Amino acid sequence: MESAIKKIEELVKEETNITIKVKILSISQKEANTQKGKSVYHYGLLGDPTGVIPFTAWSMPTTVRDKDVYQISKCYTKKFNEKIRIYFDQGTEFKLLPEELEVKRTYRYYSIRDLNTNDKYVTVEGILSNEKEREYEKEGQKKAIYQYIMRDQTGTIPLSSFGTKLPVGKGVRIEGAKLDLFNGYYRLNTYEKTAIEDVNLKITEDPEYSYIKDVKTPVGGIKVSGFIISLGEKSGLLTRCRECNTKLDDLRCADHPEAGVKYDVFIYFTVDDGTGYMQVNAGFDAISEITGITSEYLSDEKMPPLKKEIRSRIDRGLMHGAISINGNARMTEQGISFKAMKIERLDQKNYRQIVSIQEEEFA
């Protein structure tokens, strides 16, 4: 006996043998490593007049296309990250319907790392922190704007909420946030029509590793690993004006000739993880721990630091093994530029993984 057709809004718990009539909104595919070897599965979104739901298809006919309407039978729902998701397997049946189906308006869901301005309005989930409040004036009235940093397991992004204070330290799902590019970085804005709801999210403090080939968007909190394949010739010790902090090419600052100098460290390098390479720059805070260069060493007036010694410490710290880099990606005229906020030695588990990837690349 064929099951009654269910609406998406009715899919609120885990159940089996479901029949739905939906429009396929998007289809993507991904390769997974299993005990039986490599396999490909599909995922995406489907919708009906009552809502939209993500799906995962372990098996799906090659004739299924997005933007078509189907009656889909013998599928099932399960919770994934505390959210209901619908699943298709080898027993699932697809029947193409020659009709249109109105779908409740929705916005494409993105992980922060994968945000793309091809979609002006998006759906994101994450945890908010760093709340700041300021006022702005519109049509003669003062209004509040609340600014946050939103974080998920893949990265961070600034978020501004006009007139509405959002919950800090809790998981939120934001549907219809406006995405734009400002000063080289992505940012999100919420408005009156943006839908915001609490969700149960499990996000660790440490972001997951990203393959370099996947770092294509200007967001923060990105973590990559790899081997440094070249270190910039001018990396190392530099001098700054003690008064205005300007980098000096001479012994004195033109604007503050009597201020004296202070020492700093700056490096730039190319890192490769087997999937791609990227240009990275880093300052003192990012490399102090891994190189052993301390602020006390840089500020010792009796024995100023030597360029040769600084360069030697950088070489020893960075050039002999794989490293982990946490930082922010920024969009420039030349493409993505990566600013390292913290550099560490790579743990053994991820070291073996990156070596394996590189061995495959050069096999």
Image: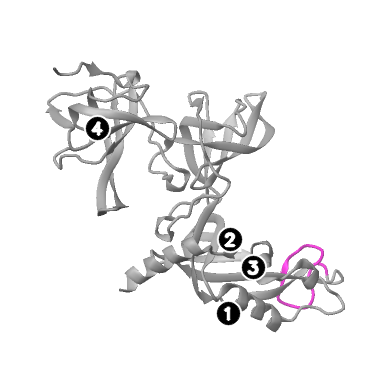
- Between circles 1 and 3, the one closer to the viewer is 3
Q: Is residue 188 above or below residue 37?
A: above
Instruction: Tell me the residue at 61%/77% (across/down).
Output: 316
Tell me the CA gap for discs 3 and 4: 49 Å
**Magenta region includes residue 247:** yes
Three-letter code, disc 4: Ile
Q: Which of the marked residues, 4 or 2, is nearer the chain's N terminus? A: 4
Residue beneath disc 2: 340
Of the 4 image quadrants, the one containing the C terminus is: bottom left
- Between circles 3 and 4, the one closer to the viewer is 3
| Residue 277 in view of the camera | no
Instruction: Tell me the residue at 26%/43% (across/down).
Output: 42
Residue 130 sits in quarter: top right
Residue beneath disc 1: 233
- Are dots 4 and 1 in contact, CB under 8 Å? no
Three-letter code, disc 3: Ile
Per the image, label 1 sits on a secondary structure element best described as loop
Q: Residues within 10 Å of mark 2 (few under 14, many from 20)?
A: many
Three-letter code, disc 2: Ala
Residue 51 sits in quarter: top left
Residue 104 sits in quarter: top left
Residue beneath disc 3: 290
Tell me the CA gap for discs 4 and 2: 40 Å
Residue 30 x %, y %: 30, 49
Tell me the CA gap for discs 4 and 1: 53 Å
- Are dots 2 and 3 in contact, CB under 8 Å? no
Residue 112 x %, y %: 47, 44
- Between circles 1 and 2, the one closer to the viewer is 2
Per the image, label 3 sits on a secondary structure element best described as helix
| Residue 81 in view of the camera | yes
